[in-house]
């Protein structure tokens, strides 16, 4: 191994690199299961991929799923802000970069840049995460659990991506419906997976609307986890070029999202 390249592993078809500047790299081949009937990468698949490489990078720091589960803890995503310049299509190879920014008050920022072969960013995202105790379902200091200090290296933020921005609900046609999450909605931490909300969202549109419109920006707030046996009130508000989507229950708001369409 060339020590100048940092941690490195290669396997087919992806390869994994943490570079000297702290950015973590993976190449992703878009396959048939990733795309919709327009042959474009699906939103829920994009988010699932970003979370997968976040997990892979966290393992480099000894903060992966198994590291945290051994301490009865797990990662929880709090916020996302994504911008889409264009959508990768079937059999495209996406050069994916992610990096961790210094944590503050128990919140861990993470950035993503998904690029084509020429280095042009197709999708960029900023996110915020926390670590919770699985019994208490509350934030916990990982150092007190015996984990090494989380990296504090300053690398790069995106000035135009503000995951903590307030979501302003637009005026428009409003639809409500009840939904009780199913087996396929839950992840290995026992709560509704972040990607499930996006699947519920895209299923609110007709096939014709999916032909006509694209989501170009997403601001997502995860406010409270959804565990089994909770019935949700899903709220969908459509304006001319914005869509608001949220999930509430008797416990309060669990999730809200604002999408910009083009």
Image (tube, helix red, strand yellow):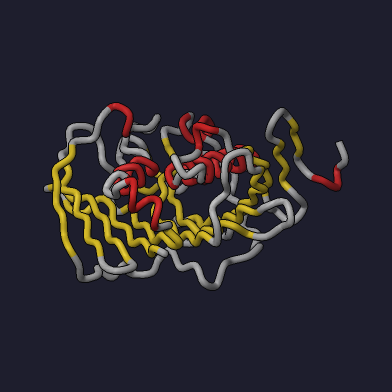
Residue in the foreground of this view, choosing between 126 and 142 = 126
Q: Visible in this render: residue 181?
A: yes
Q: Visible in this render: residue 144?
A: no
Please provide percent x and percent y for residue 201: 31, 48
Could you say which quadrant of the image residue 73 lies in? top left
Name the residue rendered at 29%, 47% in the picture.
Answer: 206
- Taking the view exactly as shown, the residue that stands out farthest to the left is 250
Residue in the foreground of this view, choosing between 155 and 17 = 17
Image check: 254 left or right of 90?
left
Q: In which quarter of the image is the N terminus?
A: top right
Please provide percent x and percent y for residue 54: 55, 44
Residue in the foreground of this view, choosing between 164 and 231 = 231
Could you say which quadrant of the image residue 105 lies in? bottom left
Q: In which quarter of the image is the C terminus?
A: bottom left
Please provide percent x and percent y for residue 196: 34, 40
Image check: 157 left or right of 24?
left
Name the residue rendered at 43%, 63% in the picture.
Answer: 163
């Amino acid at each position: 191994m060339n020590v100048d390249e940092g941690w490195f592993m290669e396997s087919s078809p992806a390869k994994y690199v943490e570079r000297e500047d702290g950015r973590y790299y993976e190449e992703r081949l878009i396959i048939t299961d990733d795309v919709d009937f327009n042959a474009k990468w699906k939103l829920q698949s994009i988010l699932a991929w970003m979370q997968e490489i976040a997990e892979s990078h966290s393992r480099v720091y000894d903060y992966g799923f198994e590291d945290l589960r051994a301490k009865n803890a797990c990662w929880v995503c709090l916020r996302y802000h994504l911008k889409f310049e264009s959508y990768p299509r079937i059999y495209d190879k996406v050069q994916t970069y992610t990096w961790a920014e210094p944590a503050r008050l128990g919140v861990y920022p993470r950035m993503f840049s998904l690029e084509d072969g020429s280095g042009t960013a197709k999708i960029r995202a900023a996110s915020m995460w926390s670590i919770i105790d699985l019994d208490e379902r509350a934030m916990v200091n990982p150092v007190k659990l015996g984990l090494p200090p989380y990296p504090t290296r300053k690398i790069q933020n995106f000035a135009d991506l503000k995951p903590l921005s307030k979501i302003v609900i637009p005026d428009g046609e409003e639809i409500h419906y009840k939904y009780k999450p199913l087996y396929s909605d839950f992840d290995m931490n026992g709560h509704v997976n972040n990607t499930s909300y996006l699947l519920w969202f895209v299923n609110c549109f007709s096939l014709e609307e999916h032909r006509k419109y694209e989501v170009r920006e997403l601001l997502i707030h995860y406010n409270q986890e959804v565990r089994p046996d909770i019935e949700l009130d899903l709220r969908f508000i459509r304006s001319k070029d914005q869509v608001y989507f949220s999930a509430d229950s008797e416990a309060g708001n669990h999730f809200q999202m604002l999408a910009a369409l083009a």
